[in-house]
Image: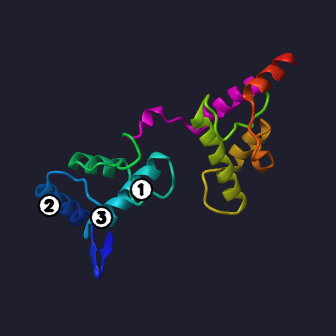
């Protein structure tokens, strides 16, 4: 539900408003400034982005809502993002953990740099693991579990990587050093 002024609209009413917008404009490229639908569509797009990233809070967005709104012609990615997120290319936690093990095998450590041309998605995953671990330690709701944290500890994962900030890691030199051992 969305509240505008003193009026609350149900999802069905919002979908009806989307249909009316489509009829009037021939598209669903709704600007954020639109009086009735702007905030709702902006929140739905934010929820879509979070859903595609596997986040907990998604503003009620799920596969069925995505299908309904996509079938109606809603464009999820506007602005700087290019094209929809391909969920088939997204890896599970276990698959990313295997990528981390492969990184560790090659470089001799599990300190994936923030910018890693070899696999930027792995670098992003590592950053997410650090954030999720901190949330778990702080008692907040998180995807991190003690079991996952222990698996990461077992491979010498560095949860607090602030000591290396500001230094760039020469991975070619690291590989050379590991090969000479």
Residue that carries the numbered disc 1 in the rendered image: 47
First of labels 2, 3 by sequence position: 2
Neighbor class of circle 2 (other Cα within 10 Å; few <14, some 14-19, many 20+) is few
First of labels 1, 2 by sequence position: 2
> Residues under labels 3 and 1: Cα distance?
14 Å
Residue 62 % position (x, y): 38, 51
Q: Which mark is residue 56?
A: none
Does residue 30 appear left or right of residue 81 in this picture?
left
Residue that carries the numbered disc 2 in the rendered image: 20
The stretch of residues the image draws in magenta is 84-107
- The answer to whether residue 39 is above or below residue 100 is below
Say what secondary structure mark 2 lies in: helix
First of labels 3, 1 by sequence position: 3
Residue 3 % position (x, y): 32, 75
Say what secondary structure mark 3 lies in: helix
Q: Tell me which residue sits at (88%, 19%) in the image.
A: 181
């Amino acid at each position: 539900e969305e509240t505008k002024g003193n009026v609350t609209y149900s999802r069905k009413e919002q979908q009806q408003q989307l249909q009316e917008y489509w009829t009037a404009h021939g598209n669903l490229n709704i600007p954020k400034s639109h009086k009735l639908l702007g905030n709702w569509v902006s929140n739905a797009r934010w929820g879509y982005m979070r859903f595609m990233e596997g986040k907990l809070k998604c503003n009620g967005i799920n596969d069925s809502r995505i299908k309904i709104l996509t079938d109606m012609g809603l464009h999820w990615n506007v602005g700087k993002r290019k094209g929809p997120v391909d969920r088939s290319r997204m890896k599970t936690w276990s698959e990313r953990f295997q990528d981390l093990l492969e990184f560790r095998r090659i470089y001799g450590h599990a300190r994936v740099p923030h910018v890693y041309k070899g696999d930027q998605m792995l670098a992003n995953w590592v950053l997410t693991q650090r954030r999720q671990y901190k949330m778990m330690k702080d008692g907040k709701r998180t995807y991190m579990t003690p079991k996952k944290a222990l698996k990461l500890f077992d491979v010498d994962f560095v949860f607090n990587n602030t000591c290396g900030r500001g230094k760039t890691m020469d991975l070619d030199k690291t590989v050379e050093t590991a090969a000479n051992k």
